[in-house]
Image (cartoon, helix red, strand yellow):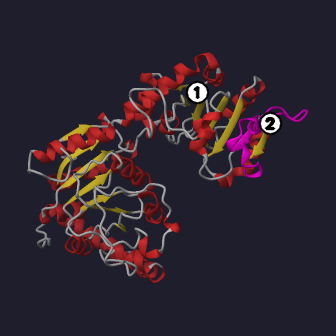
Amino acid sequence: MTSSRPRSTPLLQAYRVLSAVVFVLGFPYLLYRRSKHPDEMRERWGQEPSSAVSGVPATSATSPPAPGVSSATLSPSRTSSARPVPTGAVWIHAASLGEVEAVRAWMEDRPLRDGVSWFVTVTSTSARRRAPERLGPEVAVRFAPLDQDGPVRRFLARHEPRALILVETELWPITLDLCRRAGVPVYIASGRISPKGWSTMAWARSLYREVASAVRAAAVQGNADEERFAALGIAPTCVCGNVKYRVPGSSERDDTVARSEEETRFRGLPIWVIGSLRKGEELLLRVAREVGEQGGYVVIAPRHLRERSAWVEACRKAGVEPVLRSETPEEVLTDADAFQELFAPPRHDGPRVLLVDVHGELRSWYARAAAASVGGTWMRIGGHNLFEPLSVGVPVSFGPYIENVRDVADAALIHGGGFQTSDPAALREWVQRCLDRASRQKTERSALHTARVLAGAGERTRACLSAAEAAEVEGGIFRP
């Protein structure tokens, strides 16, 4: 598939000129980066990396990714970073690691027809490094081409994608224009334009309207997103939610979720987990002291592990004694008795809290908890992942700043899985209610129901995009 030479409108041509000027100004840096990271820059210029391997079968919807398989356990020739991109496949673009996780979750719902192959491009270096591990060895991963005529044309000519699916908000005018001219239909999944992003994009809405016809349909996260995409000229749109929300191992017919045997052993304990805690949210530590004094077990997981020393000091100032997870035996993760022994306080030091200063354990601690609070919501940050505790049946509390997680926060408040407050006394009372054995089954049921409502987004997105596709072509890439 090759694209003809673009015949741009004056507005698009002006954007191309401006983009080319920026490219020229940044060219010395690109050359320097190419000397340090040659494969990265080859990919960004629409070429294949030198590490690409030939003769490896392409992935398809009939051979799903293997989440959790580390590329470190595979030989270099078997990692997806070196896997060749299948010609004529569906191109899925996920800018950062968050969008990669959304793709991973959505593909487990099998939105594409059997036999339809696909590959993924990313923008950030962290996503390029981690995506092969997260998506599995059968999925080819590349950097997306720079939004310039040359790189995008080379990319389209080499790979001849059957369609492009953009996850969230990657609307690059030249890429959209060249896809339109090459006959590559574009779809948007989990579309989202944040208030901050809209303040930047709104001034260029005329430019986006010039290329909006490249987009066949957009499945967006919320009503505000639908209005913003429509203002850019993108239609039809439908509100479907976020495809990354899934509840693994649960059934609509029961109230259970997937937990390990070790996690299940902790379920009767009065554990409150404070996850993704940020500097400036020390008020939660004072509540932790009060909960600890009343017999609760408090687990604190700061957002940034590099701030460990600061959190140790903050805990002591708040009247609690931190026990570092990195200095505790592994038995605290598997033995409920060993876990409880951590909280026997030394004389005069006040209640203990477990300070999680290691990577990768937060979800597991949520699965052990009776209540959770998520940071970034008591500061003007906009919030962190509220869905993670809900997905394991744990009610979640949060503060007033929820701009980044409003969809989950609203659902949690509507369906009883969440509690919002800026008052420490009200937070303490809510935590105590959740830790009470008599109310635990009810709160878990409400949390899990909230998660299931949100988790239907993957199927709704497939249905939306499939309907839009069916209106134009017979067959297609999406399951009917």
| Disc 1 target residue | 422
Residue at 27% across, 42% down? 461
Q: Is residue 353 above or below residue 57?
A: above
Residue at 39% across, 52% down? 104
Quarter of the image for the N terminus: give it: bottom left
* First of labels 2, 1 by sequence position: 2
Confirm whether residue 9 shows in the render. no
Left or right of 479? Residue 242 is right
Between 249 and 340, the one lying in front of the other is 249
Identify the secondary structure beneath mark 1: loop
Residue 341, numbered label? 2
Confirm whether residue 105 shows in the render. yes
Between 463 and 350, the one lying in front of the other is 463
Numbered range of the magenta stretch: 326-354
Between 195 and 129, the one lying in front of the other is 129
Residues at discs 2 and 1 in contact (Cβ within 8 Å):
no
